[in-house]
Image (cartoon, rainbow, N blue to C red):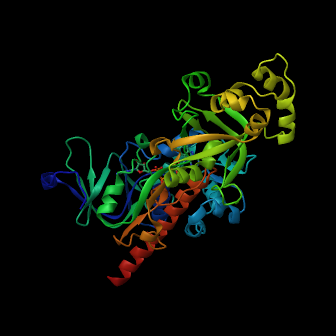
């Protein structure tokens, strides 16, 4: 048992017996509810928040990148060391399946220039509205019963315990099967706060610590004190466009870089964030965790060769200041110029060969990832080996898990939502099999 409710509260606790309890109404839990409802199963879905799908709605603010149109062999590699397991989930609901599902709710999708797939309206609200309408009033199948403001607090024997509004006694729920889809720990004010870790740990479920994924970083800066006040005041909030970010392989290995891509990111009050940094973040985070230090390299002028840059830097500048010289010869200015002056010593700036080399590969030492609460997603969670292929917990038979609370991660690009939906789909089919097996043995 893992509870923060005084035992005395159970004296008046009402009890509810349900065929299937789903806890968590994000994309994973809602997809599981849909599969089960359509299979004629009575589902009760509980969520701590006043309404479901809050993070899904937030994702809609960025256009709702639902999935990606690249071939499945490439798509599956985005899950790195979890490719094998996630591919199994995707075999039941893949990127095309997600597009078909959106279409079945009356929402057409389109493929953007990068291969990312979005709803035509670039919004999550119409999709969520149509989805909830179908779950509550299905043309066939059993309507899903929603219980909002029910916070799961753990188990009391074989009952799930839900805390409710102030003063109300907890609700005890006995379920034929339970599916947990409680999310990771990013943006906790939207509902997923990772508090479930304590409840599962007490049941002996293997977990790996939750970590930020697709996250920003704090920088060390040249003196180890972060950005200087001058740089922060002048450039926080400014984008760096058209740069190449490289995460070099560990020194001395002679291996190719771990990550190298052209793109853009933003300077923050304490460091860096934005799409290019998020894409590199797993390697940087892991290196920081392993070695306590790491850095990335920036090519500030990726369209010029090192020779061109050296030639222009070394060009006699006469009485011009170094910044007017670099601006005039190379077009370097604004935040790119600011970054050079922020991170290079005056001695380096005075040497054309060293300066040219740094313009092409400027090391930015990092201090730490930003906290998981600020990240786009969460790595770590329920170890995949703690569950069977149906996503049922070995330590707690009859309890299934899905979504971001499982130990996998992926870059942005629609991979997160697709894998959450696919794992909800997979776990729901696991529930169906377990209910069928139970019925058979009765
Ligand atoms: C800013 C932002 C933008 C994003 N954009 C995209 C995007 O464009 N494309 C993409 O693929 N992904 C995107 N994501 C990621 C994506 O939204 C998540 O991966 C996805 O929502 C996770 O789904 P889930 O169902 O596992 O968990 P969640 O969506 O987090 O849902 C979990 C639910 O469980 C409930 N819950 C948690 N604990 C309890 C408890 N103890 N008791 C009861 N209920 C509980 C929560 O209230 C919540 O409703 C974005 C994320 C963020 C933060």
Give the image quarter of residue 272: top right
Q: Residue at x 40, y 62 (%)?
A: 207
Q: Is residue 176 visible?
A: yes
Q: Is residue 141 visible?
A: no
The image shows residue 52 at horizontal and vertical percentages of 43, 46
- Comparing 8 with 318, the one in front is 318
- Comparing 99 with 276, the one in front is 276
Which residue lies most toward the top here? 319
Q: Quadrant of the C terminus?
A: bottom left
The image shows residue 321 at horizontal and vertical percentages of 77, 18
Relative vertical location of residue 91 with respect to residue 416 in this rendering, above or below: below
Which residue lies most toward the bottom here? 441
| Count of residue discs | 0
The image shows residue 146 at horizontal and vertical percentages of 38, 51
| Side of 201 relative to 338 (left or right) | left
| Side of 266 relative to 378 (left or right) | right
- Comparing 267 with 193, the one in front is 267
The image shows residue 208 at horizontal and vertical percentages of 43, 60
Relative vertical location of residue 362 with respect to residue 67 in this rendering, above or below: above
Q: Quadrant of the N terminus?
A: bottom left
Q: Residue at x 33, y 45 (%)?
A: 149
Q: Residue at x 63, y 29 (%)?
A: 342
- Comparing 379 with 106, the one in front is 379
| Side of 139 relative to 156 (left or right) | right
């Amino acid at each position: 048992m893992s509870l923060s409710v005084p035992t005395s509260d159970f004296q008046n606790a009402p009890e509810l017996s349900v065929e299937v309890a789903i806890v968590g109404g994000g994309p994973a839990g809602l997809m599981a509810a849909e599969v089960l409802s359509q299979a004629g199963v009575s589902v009760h879905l509980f969520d701590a928040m006043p309404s479901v799908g809050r993070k899904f709605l937030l994702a809609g603010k960025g256009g709702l990148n639902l999935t990606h149109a690249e071939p499945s062999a490439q798509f599956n590699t985005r899950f790195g060391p979890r490719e094998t397991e996630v591919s199994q989930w995707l075999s039941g609901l893949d990127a095309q399946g997600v597009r078909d599902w959106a279409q079945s709710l009356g929402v057409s999708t389109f493929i953007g220039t990068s291969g990312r797939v979005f709803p035509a309206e670039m919004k999550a609200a119409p999709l969520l509205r149509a989805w909830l309408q179908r779950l509550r009033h299905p043309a066939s199948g059993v309507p899903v019963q929603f219980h909002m403001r029910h916070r799961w607090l753990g188990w009391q024997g074989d009952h799930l315990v839900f805390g409710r509004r102030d003063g109300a006694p907890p609700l005890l729920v006995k379920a034929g099967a339970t599916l947990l889809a409680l999310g990771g720990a990013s943006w906790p004010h939207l509902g997923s706060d990772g508090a479930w870790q304590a409840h599962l740990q007490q049941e002996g479920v293997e977990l790996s610590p939750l970590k930020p994924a697709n996250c920003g970083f704090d920088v060390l800066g040249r003196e180890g004190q972060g950005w200087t006040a001058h740089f922060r005041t002048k450039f926080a909030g400014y984008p760096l466009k058209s740069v190449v970010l490289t995460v070099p392989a560990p020194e001395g290995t002679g291996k190719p870089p771990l990550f190298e891509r052209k793109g853009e990111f933003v300077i923050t009050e304490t460091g860096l964030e934005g799409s290019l940094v998020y894409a590199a973040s797993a390697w940087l985070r892991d290196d920081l965790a392993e070695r306590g230090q790491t850095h990335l390299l920036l090519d500030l002028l990726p369209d010029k060769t090192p020779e061109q840059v050296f030639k222009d830097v070394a060009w006699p500048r006469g009485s011009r200041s170094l910044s007017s010289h670099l601006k005039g010869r190379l077009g370097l200015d604004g935040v790119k110029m600011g970054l050079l002056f922020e991170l290079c010593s005056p001695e380096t700036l005075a040497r054309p060969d060293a300066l040219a080399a740094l313009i092409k590969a400027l090391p930015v030492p990092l201090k730490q990832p930003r906290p998981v609460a600020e990240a786009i997603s969460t790595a770590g969670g329920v170890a995949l080996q703690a569950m069977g292929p149906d996503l049922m917990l070995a330590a707690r038979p009859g309890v299934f898990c899905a979504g971001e609370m499982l130990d996998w991660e992926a870059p942005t690009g629609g991979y997160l939502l697709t894998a959450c939906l696919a794992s909800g789909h997979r776990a729901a089919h696991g529930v169906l099999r377990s209910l069928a097996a139970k019925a058979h043995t009765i």
